[in-house]
Amino acid sequence: MLQRGLIQAADVVVSNGSKQSLFNACFVLFGPGDEVLVPTPAWTSYYEMVTLARATSVPVWGDPAHDWKVTADALAAAATPRTRGIMLNSPSNPTGAVYTQAELEAIAALAAEHDWWIISDEIYARITYGIAAPSLLDVVSSRDRLILINGVAKAYAMTGWRIGWASAPRAVASAMTALQSHSTSNPAAVSQHAALAALTNTAAADAAIAMMVAEFRARRDAATALLDAAKACYVRPDGAFYLYIDVGGDGGAFATRLLDAQGVAVVPGTAFLTPEWVRLSYAAPREQVLEGVRRLAAAL
């Protein structure tokens, strides 16, 4: 395990949201001929960011019976001599799955063995239910090929403020800064001051986050009880605020029918390369969430 204090200001690049941090990392690290392993299902932008960097994203499907999490063995089997990195996300969007420390240790060891980069998107790390979401900093012995991504959008509910950051080896951070200087330059100063207030007023922030997570957990438990009663197949999330549900057919057609007939919006699993599934967010008032789940269960 590394000491977190080893990260210094010059190792950090603040961007217009964690999405830009992820984009910067992909653009700096990867290029034509490179392959990047993406545990799948994954947030749809990962695949596109790798493509925009003119590299090739390689989906590595997890096991639905294991909350769609991938193993080090599955990643090794998908690798080729052109593999240059892995994009990890724990807790996961869209499944809410949380990788254990042992699972991350195995993946980190594989990456170290092959000199792969790891981009670890930890934006949901503080939104978990009963278990902790280990950081890659908790499992690696060196930061030399590790990029950590985080921001204030999720745990601090500051999505519209557009503040994210990447912690990277000094040379990579410098390259990301240079890239950003020719695109968006810096995030808005008012957003940076707001984020600084949230990050430094730890007592108030911790209390607010604990209250929010408790409410998310209550929504999750009530919603999954409805899904259980309907005998639905889904991933029980240990983190984030999504329900990933198997609709047993064309998820896009199901999502369209659900919206048109029931007024419930879900994201088709096609966006995450698992077309028979849909993602429902429970980051909405509890009664709205539960009514949406009731209508979805009836549509199933």
Image (cartoon, rainbow, N blue to C red):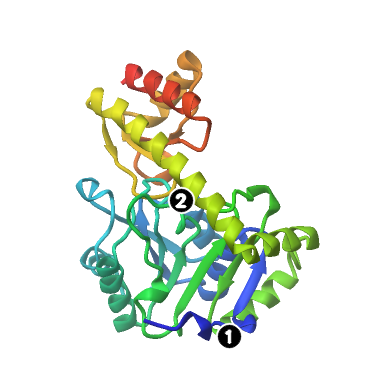
Q: Earlier along the polypeptide chain: callout 2 or callout 1?
A: 2
Judged left or right of residue 111, residue 219 is right
Look at label 1 and name its amino acid: Arg
Q: How many marks?
A: 2
Compared with residue 41, is residue 171 higher up or lower down, i.e. above or below? below
Instruction: Tell me the residue that label 1 is attached to.
Output: 170
Given residues 151 and 182, the one toward you in this image is: 151
Amino acid beneath label 2: Trp
Q: Quadrant of residue 145?
A: bottom left
Q: Nearer the viewer, residue 144 or 251?
A: 144
- The local crowd at label 2, few if under 14, some if 14 to 19, many if 20 or more residues have their Cα within 10 Å, is some
Q: Which structural element holds mark 2?
A: loop
Residue 187 on image: x %, y %: 74, 62
Q: In this rendering, does residue 25 appear at all?
A: yes
For the point 60% across and 67% down, which residue is it? Answer: 165
Q: Which secondary structure, mark 1? A: helix
Whether residue 276 is visible: no
- In the picture, the quarter occupied by the N terminus is bottom left
Relative to 90, does residue 165 appear above or below in the rendering? below
Q: Are marks 2 and 1 in contact (CB under 8 Å)?
A: no
* Circle 1 crowding by C-alpha within 10 Å: few under 14, some 14–19, many from 20: some
Q: Position of residue 129 (x, y in %)?
A: 36, 49
Q: Quadrant of the C terminus?
A: top left
Vertical order, 40 against 246 (above or below): below
Q: Calculate the distance from the C-alpha at mark 2 to the C-alpha at mark 1.
A: 27 Å
Question: Residue under circle 2?
Answer: 43
User: Residue drawn 35% across and 18% down?
Assistant: 299
